[in-house]
Image (cartoon, rainbow, N blue to C red):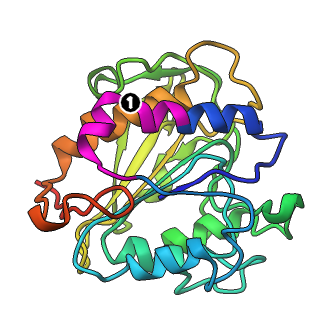
Amino acid sequence: AIYSGPTNPGWISDGAVEEIVKTVTKHAGVKAMFDNIDNYGDGDEVGDKSPLGKWLTSHTNNGQTDVVFTACGTCPSSFYQFPNKDPDGSNIENFIEAGNVHVNVADWIYYMSYEGGVRSADNAADGAANVFDIPGLSFGDRGTDFQPTAEGKKYIPSLKAFDSARPWHMEQFKGTPWDLVAFAVDKGDKNSADPVVAISKEDGKDGTGMIAAMWQKDAPVWAGKPDPRGIGVAEFLVNWLQENATFAVNPKEKMSTTWGYVKARRK
């Protein structure tokens, strides 16, 4: 599924999100992978019983890996009730622990919602810390020159050097149940990285849970063209996810649900 807004206008503009969604859904490789993609927007995301909430819970522990992409960068109450009202066992945490995939762009992942066009009470840093189950986890600003790694050059060929505002602090993941793949790291600090995908070391009923937080930068309009938050996500899905997951399509249901009816497992 895609969640496309409303946005925090200081993080990413409505127009940018619209173009990102268009880029991802019209990408030839993505279209070849997935037969149907549902897009949820303003009014679809409030609470467990909302359309997005029902999608998330119905695609948790259903025996197949599904993907949700937050193109607007915010965390609605259908994912995680603000401010930190469900620190353990939120819908998004359950979805990931069951073996599903969440991809996020824009600023600090799980930080707050903007549903209804109004900023929610902030989860702040605790949102991500709770979903990852890493106390004190931070995506605080550090580093200025994030250069593509070998993995970045291979899997996200459009990736260019940039200044991330909310990088992953790689050292905080040591000794946790997560493996990290960094696609760009800061030139002066190899522990600061963005984009990154975290891969759970523990499989769930649906497969292997993953969280990809990418281009975490407050940029209402990206300075360069093309906007990497669109083409970069498409390349990540087509190039990296396909190589690192085994998709067994049910021929009777040919990828008819959001992001496809697929079974994905790590190699």
Name the residue located 34 percent from the left edge and 68 percent from the top edge. 177
Relative height, residue 149 to residue 10 (above, below): above
The crowd level at tag 1 (other Cα within 10 Å; few <14, some 14-19, many 20+) is: some
Q: Identify the residue at the far top of this view.
A: 225
Q: Is residue 35 magenta?
A: yes
**Quadrant in which residue 80 is drawn:** bottom right
Q: Is mark 1 on a helix, strand or loop?
A: loop
Relative height, residue 142 to residue 162 (above, below): below
| Residue 61: % across, % down | 31, 83
Relative height, residue 51 to residue 164 (above, below): below
| Residue 22: % across, % down | 53, 34
Q: Where does label 1 land, which residue?
A: 27
Q: Is residue 245 visible?
A: yes
| Residue 180: % across, % down | 35, 49
Instruction: Report the predominant secondary structure element of the magenta stretch.
Output: helix
**Quadrant in which residue 129 is drawn:** bottom right
Q: Give the tally of numbered discs.
A: 1
Q: Does the magenta stretch include residue 101?
A: no
Q: What residue type is labelled 1?
A: His
Name the residue located 84 percent from the left edge and 40 percent from the top edge. 10
Name the residue located 25 percent from the left edge and 44 percent from the top edge. 33
Q: Identify the residue at the far front of this view.
A: 252
- The quadrant the C terminus occupies is bottom left
Q: Is residue 58 left or right of residue 17?
A: left
| Residue 174: % across, % down | 39, 58
Q: Give the range drawn in magenta.
A: 22-36
Q: Can residue 183 be seen in this view?
A: no
Q: In this view, does 220 lie to the left or right of 79?
A: right
